[in-house]
Image (cartoon, rainbow, N blue to C red):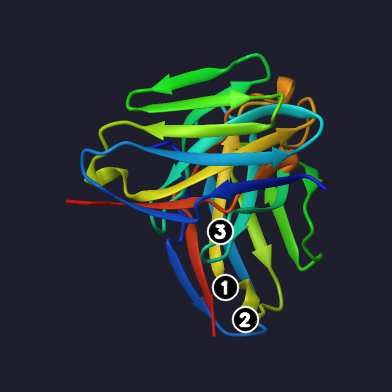
Amino acid sequence: ETGVTQSPTHLIKTRGQQVTLRCSSQSGHNTVSWYQQALGQGPQFIFQYYREEENGRGNFPPRFSGLQFPNYSSELNVNALELDDSALYLCASSLDLAGGGNEQFFGPGTRLTVL
Amino acid sequence: KNQVEQSPQSLIILEGKNCTLQCNYTVSPFSNLRWYKQDTGRGPVSLTIMTFSENTKSNGRYTATLDADTKQSSLHITASQLSDSASYICVVSAGYGGSQGNLIFGKGTKLSVKP
């Protein structure tokens, strides 16, 4: 166990709906990154939050948005869901950004199915 | 274009045997290389992380090597166990710190260990 928790574990939505996924980072970590992992693929970076500010974004449309709270927990919001949004959504926490070698600790993921 | 290629895509071995997974990357500038183990439907768990100056790093029965000149890494698993069945993902960090969006993920090698 990494100490990173995500909720819910599974979720089923229909096209056009909105969804909010939640992540609690490991104690002492101030950075949260979100990834989308399609079946059989490696994780794709969505965005990262550092001290409540977005700090980097991957190639995802604006309907993917996020928040980080003062306790460093985070939310991923996806509007106007599409079938291709079906994936495992991973949250990873780490401690600051210095040096590039800071290890990321992943949560168990939320499996989103869009029908 | 920054890329991480892993081979083989999948591998089946018998319990107790050794195996080696390969990772080739074209990422510049290089910061570090990580190997993760991901059980089906779960978040990745870090096995090793190596910087430019490190050639080898071990974590129990897992030994990772890095050749920064040829931009190749390998993950060797010794005396495999049924619990080693998982996807193994190679991740290369581009740049010198900063956004974790500089992490380039491979698609993973799916390892199945049979009794």
Residue A34: assigned label: none
- Mark 2 sits on what residue? A83
Question: At numbered mark 3, what does the secondary structure look like: helix, strand or loop?
Answer: strand
Residue A86: assigned label: 1
The reply to whether callout 1 and callout 2 are in contact (CB within 8 Å) is yes
Q: Amino acid at mark 3?
A: Tyr
**Subunit ID for the residue under disc 1:** A
- Mark 3 sits on what residue? A89
Q: Amino acid at mark 2?
A: Leu
User: What residue is rendered at 79% in x and 58% in y?
Assistant: A59
**Subunit ID for the residue under disc 3:** A
Q: Residue furthest top?
A: B53
Note whether B78 is above or below A83 in the view shown: above
Note whether A112 is above or below B34 in the view shown: below
User: What residue is rendered at 73% in x and 63% in y?
Assistant: A64
Q: Amino acid at mark 1?
A: Ser
User: What residue is rendered at 57% in x and 60% in y?
Assistant: A41
